[in-house]
Image (cartoon, rainbow, N blue to C red):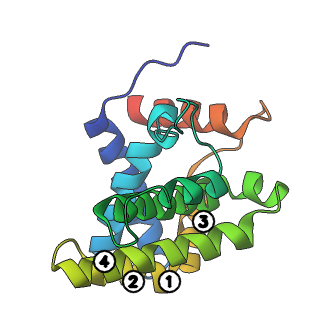
């Protein structure tokens, strides 16, 4: 089956609706800033090239959180803009994986590690934003403090609004579900 490429605006509209419905179901409808941020993360990571956008010095795509954290340390100094962006990426990646692909993460026994590293990464981003007076330290602090809750909200969204596929491959099933949702 060929899945056509989805444009970012369609993905954002699709995920925005599902995130808002899930947040409403969970009594979080007033948390619009985080809902908007999660919508952007979901739309961005819906394509594998953006999910695995970091490469090591040999040009190989980095696919594990451990490799991402090692890459974070390759920046020039600890409080660099590079570290902030890498930590934001680690937070986004772990939130996406623990929310949308929780079963996969659990099978690999990564859940607690991903939750801890995601919360820690968002905390570092928040502190960096406070120190520089840029970014959104309050939202990243909220994502850090309530990481497990937001991860659970994405898992809830997946369980309630996505049908389970028969392929056994959670990633391809996810893409097919997205493409079906956008066309309807």
Between residues 69 and 164, which one lies in front from this camera angle?
A: 69
Q: Disc 2 and disc 4: Cα gap in Å?
A: 14 Å
**Pointer 2: what residue?**
142
Please tell me which of labels 1 and 3 falls first in the chain: 1
Looking at the image, residue 158 sits to the left or right of residue 10; the answer is right
Do the numbered discs 2 and 3 sit on residues whose CB atoms are within 8 Å? no
From this viewpoint, which residue is outermost toward the left? 133
**Mark 4: which secondary structure?**
helix
Q: Which of marks 2 and 4 is nearer the N terminus?
A: 4
Q: In the picture shown, does residue 145 fall above or below 71?
A: below
The residue that appears at 51% across and 37% down in the rendered structure is 55
Horizontal and vertical percent position of residue 29: 35, 77
Question: How far apart, in angstroms, are the residues tagged by discs 2 and 1?
Answer: 6 Å
Is there a contact, CB below 8 Å, between mark 4 and mark 1?
A: no
Q: Position of residue 146 (x, y in %)?
A: 50, 83
Q: Which residue is drawn at 59% across and 77% down?
A: 148
Task: Name which residue lies at 37% across and 27% down.
Answer: 6
| In the image: residue 133, left or right of residue 180 | left
Graded by Cα atoms within 10 Å as few (under 14), some (14 to 19) or many (20 or more), the crowding at tag 4 reads many
Q: Which of marks 2 and 3 is in front?
A: 2
Location of mark 3 (residue): 156
* Numbered tag placed on residue 146 in the rendering: 1
Residue at which label 4 appears = 128
Disc 4 to disc 3, C-alpha distance: 31 Å
Give the alpha-carbon distance from disc 4 to disc 1, as whole Å: 18 Å
Task: Determine whether 152 is above or below 141 in the image.
Answer: above
Could you tell me how many numbered marks the image carries? 4
Distance between the alpha carbons at the discs numbered 2 and 3 = 19 Å
Find numbered disc 1 in the image and state the secondary structure of the residue it sits on. loop
């Amino acid at each position: 089956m060929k899945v056509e490429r989805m444009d970012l605006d369609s993905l954002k509209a699709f995920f925005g609706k599902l995130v808002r419905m899930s947040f409403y179901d969970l009594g979080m409808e007033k948390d619009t800033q985080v809902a908007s941020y999660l919508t952007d993360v979901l739309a961005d990571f819906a394509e594998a090239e953006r999910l695995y956008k970091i490469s090591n010095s040999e040009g190989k795509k980095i696919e594990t959180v451990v490799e991402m954290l090692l890459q974070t340390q390759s920046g020039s100094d600890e409080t660099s803009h590079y570290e902030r962006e890498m930590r934001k990426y680690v937070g986004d990646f772990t939130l996406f994986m623990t929310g949308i692909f929780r079963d996969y993460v659990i099978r690999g026994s990564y859940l607690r590690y991903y939750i801890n590293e995601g919360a820690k990464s968002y905390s570092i981003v928040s502190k960096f934003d406070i120190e520089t007076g840029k970014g959104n330290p309050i939202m990243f602090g909220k994502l850090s403090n309530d990481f497990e809750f937001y991860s659970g909200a994405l898992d809830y969204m997946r369980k309630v609004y996505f049908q389970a596929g028969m392929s056994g491959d959670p990633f391809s099933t996810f893409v097919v579900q997205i493409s079906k949702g956008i066309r309807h």
